[in-house]
Image (tube, coloured by chain):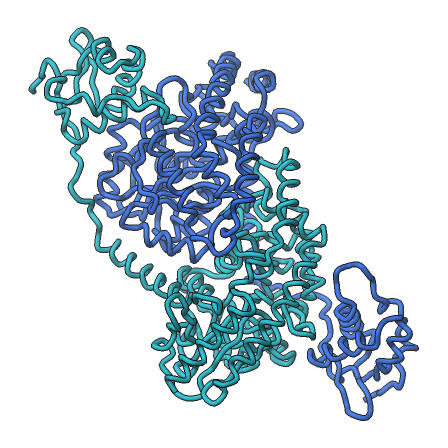
Chain colours: A blue, B cyan
Amino acid sequence: MPLLTNMMEPLRLEPLFPERGTGEPLAAQLARRLRDAVENGTLAPGTKMLGSRQLALRLGIARNTVTLAFEQLVAEGYLTSRSGSGTFVTPSRFQRARRPTVTRSSQAERARFAALRGRFDAATGRGPLRPGMPSLASFPRAAWNRCARRALSAYAGDIGYGHASGLDSLRREIATHVRQFRGVSALPEQVIVVEGAQSAFHLASVVLARSGDSIAIEDPCYALARAAFELYGLQLQAVRVDRDGILPGELPAKARFAFVTPTHQFPLGGTLPLSRRLKLLAWAKRHEAYVIEDDYDSEFTSRVRPLPALQSLDRDERVIYVGSFSKTLAPGLRVGYLISPPHLASAFRVARASTSLGVSLHLQATLAQFIGGGHFARHIRRANAAYETRRTILARALDPLADSFETGPMQVGLHVALIARRRFKDRAASEISEGERLVPLSELSVARSDCRGFVLGFTNGSDDEIASAADRVCRRLRNLG
Amino acid sequence: MPLLTNMMEPLRLEPLFPERGTGEPLAAQLARRLRDAVENGTLAPGTKMLGSRQLALRLGIARNTVTLAFEQLVAEGYLTSRSGSGTFVTPSRFQRARRPTVTRSSQAERARFAALRGRFDAATGRGPLRPGMPSLASFPRAAWNRCARRALSAYAGDIGYGHASGLDSLRREIATHVRQFRGVSALPEQVIVVEGAQSAFHLASVVLARSGDSIAIEDPCYALARAAFELYGLQLQAVRVDRDGILPGELPAKARFAFVTPTHQFPLGGTLPLSRRLKLLAWAKRHEAYVIEDDYDSEFTSRVRPLPALQSLDRDERVIYVGSFSKTLAPGLRVGYLISPPHLASAFRVARASTSLGVSLHLQATLAQFIGGGHFARHIRRANAAYETRRTILARALDPLADSFETGPMQVGLHVALIARRRFKDRAASEISEGERLVPLSELSVARSDCRGFVLGFTNGSDDEIASAADRVCRRLRNLG
């Protein structure tokens, strides 16, 4: 065992000099630097360390700092202290491996996730016609910031562990909002505050299904919901959608739940008629299945109010209702809600606490004040009026494409589908210009190959931006035809 | 089909009168009230409605409002319009069921969740000695609120969809923090910002395991982590813990991952020595397993810095590191982090986006400023000094129990274990007084029955409160002995 009597000659001292003002205590810094020296081999196993007094002098630090660092490294096993003879680098040390072992099973996992990642990218639009992005310019910043400041000073007692399912005040406001706007009947106890619809899809999967179970999903459908279900290991059963929404006659006999967007089908835009709603609920009752209702943008509507939520018709507690503030306010708030049937409310609360102890209490308090103060309803009214203008602009601008594309229903929500009348390679045509990309319907299709075209939003830009983006789309798609 | 010529006589008009100033448009209100009347049978199938002009007059609202409501209900199928003869309640209507059908399978699910819920409750303490609750009174509110206000005005562009894995600025600050305080080496790309450790446990399960897989867990262990794994359907393999932490020789041959608290075992308090750390890593490498390292309160330490994180020794990318701001700042912020090995970073990012699109951007921006401005390191230093006092107070106050209880190590973190030397029914003795409850070790045990006693925190109260609570514990437990 080579016990060098002095380590300082072979080891250049510079790497040990402490940096001041970094917030890291000097003893911790020195320990870290010595540790690195042991690990990278600069300090070989068995090396005798300089005495603490001598090292302190050379580094210009207190001796006590060196002693602390040595004690630390002795505790960690990097150094060994022999009474009377000094401190040594512990003889047998592990060496830093050149490369990590990435196993074959890890590689398989990586491939699985890479496939999912591709789906996310493919389903995202860019530019003024990006679907699913509300007008951030019209976010009611002044009112929001007032509520946020008030909540900041008020939340004295509110920095402990809150209820994982949400602040009572916010759950009450959400229950009132969905009753008034969507006809949803729910007690605050049924409301679970989550980070957005994506969390709600995942949470519902956790409560309702096990990995390997089958679920029914609209075809075409919202890609991120699909990703949530696939990641959880669910088997997708595609159910076709027409101009009015899902075809309940095609629902499979065996499925834990169906995922639907009954009031504004994503992406095709249909509003499911009452008769189909009743069939869907009867299916759920008959098969002891559930229905996840994603009601993501029904607050926005042209003239007539949309149908109330499917949940309002549910007499058998089969509907899990999902809403989000990402479309009605802004995605960056990161808050949404799930409304559980009464008999599952306790299960949802437990599952929520097991997967996340909840959303920022300050955010929740701000939002509760914002809704309670009437700002939310006011914002929806204003935004709806502005969106109505853009809806009309987009509809008109797409007229020249009528020969090749059918336009989906657009009385509700923030997007419209442009469905090709003939066979068409939508993916190839989705890049409109630098920075502008439409979402092709092929990327949102599960099993079908007959539904091609695009989903266009009309809220991610001003009136003029929407108009000129729509013109570019027309030019691009007419050139193809 | 009974077509009453006038519905207004049987139906009292009061339920239809609109409420003003609720934010709900009058037409929507009227539609809702008429819908209720149909559903509860007040308006029988086939009933002929009053004309819109007459109804508007009686209710004192605009005729157009009534027309809109009628149109809505016709669209929904509640009313049927016959040209020339008027508007009728649609003849065949579904009836509100008396009771929902709660199926047998739903009942089984409910039982599963009820069991989990019981575990949560049993593992929660109350009073000044509640473990896991930092001193909220010393939360640096002024500095935090300054950062929050600045972030509010700055986050103009930041209300869109952010990166689901976190703001770049915050991920950089976290990478720096864990390097300085915990010796963790990570690029910002490996950092995933989550709502807290609970979300991290769940996310790691999603990435590393499938329902039905086995995992190794410390015995006794942190109950909420256990709940996360159980909810995900994982099979627990209990591995005993001694005064120094987990016994790596007892790790099972087959497990997808091991969950450990190497720097401050929860609940017993041990710090895993280097030799065991290396064995744990060798186990993970040999079995292609991973290690989830929960490093929840190691920033707080008495005199000597604790061992660096296990992650710092990981040469084979087997460690998933989990940290939280719930102990270092406040649980109500609801933010924590997971640090993925490089080869799994992309998988974690995709899994994160599939289960949640992320944490409030305002919160993240606030926290990034708070850390970057040096407030975080300063707060930890101050809190650490205050906690050191309380640690000493508690240790002394427990002295009289030394005959019946061994005190676990308490150099690191915010709690201490009080381990019974003889057979002892800890559950029966856990209620100390009204509002004061200790967490019994039996509730944290997985398979073993030889580890009884309590976990006591010392940060959920002032020095005096800790001292007097500890006295009450002594009196209560000595009375039992």
Query: What residue is shown at x 17% (from left), y 16% (from top)?
Result: B49
Q: Report the quarter where the C terminus of chain A lies.
A: top right
- Image position of A60 (left or right of A232): right
Query: What residue is shown at x 78% (from left), y 79% (from top)?
Result: A67
Residue B317: x and y in percent read 63, 64
- Image position of B373 (left or right of A311): right
* Of the pair A81 and A262, the residue shown nearer to us: A81
Residue A254: x and y in percent read 28, 47
* Of the pair A231 and A91, the residue shown nearer to us: A91
Q: Residue furthest right?
A: A9
Residue B336: x and y in percent read 57, 55
Q: Relative to residue A342, is residue B391 depicted above or below?
A: below
Image quadrant of residue A93? bottom right
Q: Can the viewer see residue B55 in this picture?
A: yes
Residue B169: x and y in percent read 68, 47
Q: Relative to residue B409, is residue B98 depicted above or below?
A: above
Q: Residue furthest bottom?
A: A84
- Image position of B420 (left or right of A60): left
Q: Can the viewer see residue B259 in this picture?
A: no
